[in-house]
């Protein structure tokens, strides 16, 4: 038999097995993985979800009437990027820039629209942290120093009696969860399963808590489970987000918080809130304003400070704190980031919020996107100083969380 015939026969056998497996496992996690493949920003359509409703008092972010506040180009890595073209050609769906509390740019690409929702992916981790801070303020959780097993006693035999909530927030809990996307890893199963508790109950602590940082979505999902256990009976995490974020922030559109199953499932807090770019931007603006919105303290200011401070204690790297990324060693910015290039970038020094939603990273790597936001923020600050419009505050006079005490020499690049 010729090589071409052998290859064709082999391909046919493989295709047959794939079809067989797809049918055989159509109602289970593996079947979902085969049917749906790599995750995408429309996955809120394939998962069950709980609905977040628009705020009864929607409050749009005002538009800046001044012209010239948003640069049209940026010199980055030795090249001049025409920003509109760059976003369009690099898988961008939405871009919003907010300076001194007002929108200076709002653009949509590739068929996206202002009222279209898109998956947050790991930006949801940062929102989960905000809800934990609210739960501590409301007395449902005593503090981030409380033991995980106070809420999840079934995890005690797996070593979680030594783990505090803050270890999960910093991703230094020492669990054996492996953040890998190949089919034999646990991570895609957590994404597609209709029983996340089954996976979470099998996580075990293998390193001493508070000694080693490693990015793990499973540890965030434990935070979601803790939050569900801490809330009053009958109140879901979605209900709590509605009360603490969606209503107070005047969200203009509804959203979907995906769950593993209905009616009794857990929210996928590690990945799966689908909302509009405008409403994601409001979360960033609230964080920029130290947790305040419309004169009210939506999230405790002290929690925002803890979540965005530079802190290398207990194994935490300077570039990650309480589910938020730090991009600059001087501590002036913070970011929520998600798979396929979902970003909320907050620059305290320049009183600036940048939001980008996309279907992929385009020609940039994750590292390049992070550097891009820092460079674009600096360029926007330069435009303001050059007379781009009447700012309500000086270009570098933002409301800034207090700088934490010096905790030693920081590394030179974020993790």
Image (cartoon, grey):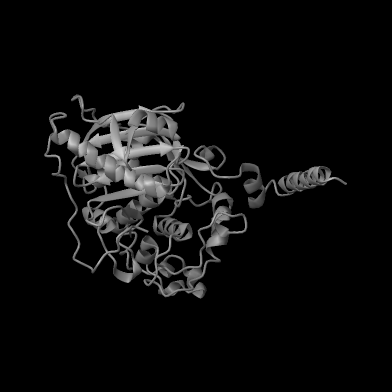
Image position, residue 397 (x, y; %): 13, 44
Q: Is residue 2 visible?
A: yes
Question: Where 214 falls versus 387 (above or below)?
Answer: below
Q: Is residue 194 above or below residue 85?
A: below
Picture mark count = 0
Q: Is 100 left or right of 89, judged from the image as shown?
A: left
Residue 28 appears in the figure: no
Q: Nearer the viewer, residue 297 or 187?
A: 187
**x and y, in percent, of residue 23 in the image:** 74, 45
- Side (left or right) of 361 relative to 19: left
Instruction: Please tell me which residue lies in front, 78 or 301.
Output: 78
Relative to residue 244, is residue 407 depicted above or below? below
Q: Residue at x 24, y 48 (%)?
A: 291
- Residue 288 lies, in percent from the top left, at 23, 45
* Residue at 32% over, 41% down: 78
Q: Position of residue 218 (x, y in %)?
A: 48, 59
Q: Quadrant of the C terminus?
A: bottom left
Looking at the image, which residue is at 54% across and 42% down?
48
Q: Which quarter of the figure has residue 136?
A: bottom left
Residue extending farthest to the right is 1
């Amino acid at each position: 038999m010729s090589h071409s015939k052998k290859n064709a026969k082999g391909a046919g056998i493989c295709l047959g097995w794939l079809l067989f497996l797809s049918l055989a496992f159509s109602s289970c996690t593996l079947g979902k993985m085969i049917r749906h493949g790599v995750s995408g920003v429309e996955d809120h359509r394939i998962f069950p979800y709980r609905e977040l409703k628009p705020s009864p008092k929607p409050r749009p972010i005002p538009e800046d009437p001044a012209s010239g506040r948003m640069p049209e180009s940026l010199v980055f890595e030795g090249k001049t990027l025409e920003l509109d073209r760059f976003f369009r050609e690099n898988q961008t769906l939405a871009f919003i820039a907010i300076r001194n509390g007002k929108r200076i740019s709002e653009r949509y690409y590739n068929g996206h629209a202002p009222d279209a929702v898109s998956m947050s992916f790991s930006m949801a981790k940062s929102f989960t942290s905000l809800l934990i801070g609210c739960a501590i303020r409301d007395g449902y959780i005593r503090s981030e120093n409380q033991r995980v097993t106070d809420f999840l006693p079934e995890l005690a035999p797996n070593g979680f009696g030594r783990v505090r909530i803050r270890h999960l927030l910093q991703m230094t809990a020492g669990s054996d969860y492996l953040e890998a996307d190949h089919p034999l890893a646990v991570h895609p199963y957590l994404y597609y399963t209709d029983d996340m508790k089954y996976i979470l109950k099998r996580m075990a602590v293998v390193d001493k808590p508070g000694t080693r940082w490693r990015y793990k979505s499973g540890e965030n999902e434990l935070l979601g489970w803790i939050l569900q256990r801490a809330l009053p009976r009958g109140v879901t995490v979605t209900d709590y987000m509605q009360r603490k974020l969606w209503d107070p922030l005047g969200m203009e559109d509804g959203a979907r918080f995906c769950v593993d199953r209905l009616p009794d499932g857990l929210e996928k807090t590690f990945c799966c809130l689908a909302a509009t770019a405008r409403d994601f931007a409001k979360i960033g603006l609230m964080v920029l304003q130290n947790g305040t919105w419309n004169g009210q303290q939506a999230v405790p200011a002290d929690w925002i400070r803890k979540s965005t401070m530079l802190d290398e204690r207990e194994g935490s790297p300077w570039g990650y704190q309480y589910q938020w990324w730090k991009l600059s060693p001087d501590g002036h910015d913070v970011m929520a980031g998600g798979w396929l290039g979902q970003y909320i970038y907050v620059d305290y020094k320049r009183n600036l919020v940048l939001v980008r939603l996309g279907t992929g990273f385009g020609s940039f790597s994750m590292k390049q996107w992070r550097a891009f936001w820092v460079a674009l923020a600096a360029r926007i600050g330069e435009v303001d100083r050059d007379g781009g419009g009447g700012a309500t505050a000086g270009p570098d006079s933002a409301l800034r969380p207090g700088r934490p005490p010096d905790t030693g020499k920081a590394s030179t690049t974020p993790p």
